[in-house]
Image (tube, rainbow, N blue to C red):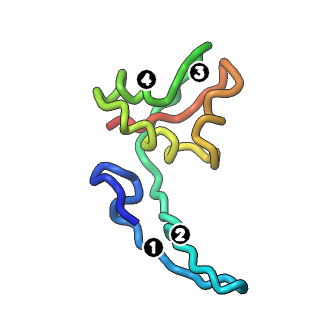
């Protein structure tokens, strides 16, 4: 597997497993997430993580930093419901 250098998975190891039917599958190992210095934001109607990241970090591809600072498994679930408070890393 190849990831872009700014991907959250760029430095994460992968594993290959053989399934019972003989197929091989590759997966990314779980990443350990350290606590980060963050502040809370309020989700507004029509918000997107890439737009929040662009506003905060001048880089929309850093949306995953916001996702990692929270406990949702699906990043877009952070945006529901409107009015929800989410964490965003300070840097």
Q: CA distance from mark 4 to mark 2?
A: 29 Å
Query: Would you identify the image quadrant in which residue 37 lies?
Result: top left
Q: Is residue 71 left or right of residue 1?
A: right
Reading the chain from its start, which is encountered first: label 3 or label 2?
A: 2
* Residue in front for this viewpoint, 28 or 17: 17
Q: CA distance from mark 4 to mark 3?
A: 12 Å
Reading the chain from its start, which is encountered first: label 1 or label 3?
A: 1
The residue depicted at 66 percent of the width and 36 percent of the height is 77
**Residue with the mark numbered 2:** 27
Q: Are marks 2 and 1 in contact (CB under 8 Å)?
A: yes
**Residue with the mark numbered 3:** 43
Is 47 located above or below residue 63 in the figure? above
* Residue in front for this viewpoint, 3 or 62: 3
Could you tell me residue 87's position as x and y percent? Answer: 52, 35
Which of pointers 4 and 1 indicates the residue nearer the eye? 1
Reading the chain from its start, which is encountered first: label 4 or label 3?
A: 3
**Residue with the mark numbered 4:** 51
Q: CA distance from mark 1 to mark 3?
A: 34 Å
The residue depicted at 47 percent of the width and 38 percent of the height is 66
């Amino acid at each position: 597997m190849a990831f872009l250098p700014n991907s959250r998975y760029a430095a994460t190891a992968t594993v290959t497993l053989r399934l019972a039917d003989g197929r091989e599958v590759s997966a990314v190992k779980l990443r350990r997430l350290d606590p980060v210095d963050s502040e809370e934001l309020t989700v507004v109607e029509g918000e997107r993580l890439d737009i929040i990241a662009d506003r905060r970090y001048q880089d929309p591809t850093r949306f995953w930093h916001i996702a990692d600072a929270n406990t949702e498994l699906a990043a877009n679930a952070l945006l529901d419901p409107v009015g929800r408070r989410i964490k965003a890393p300070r840097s």
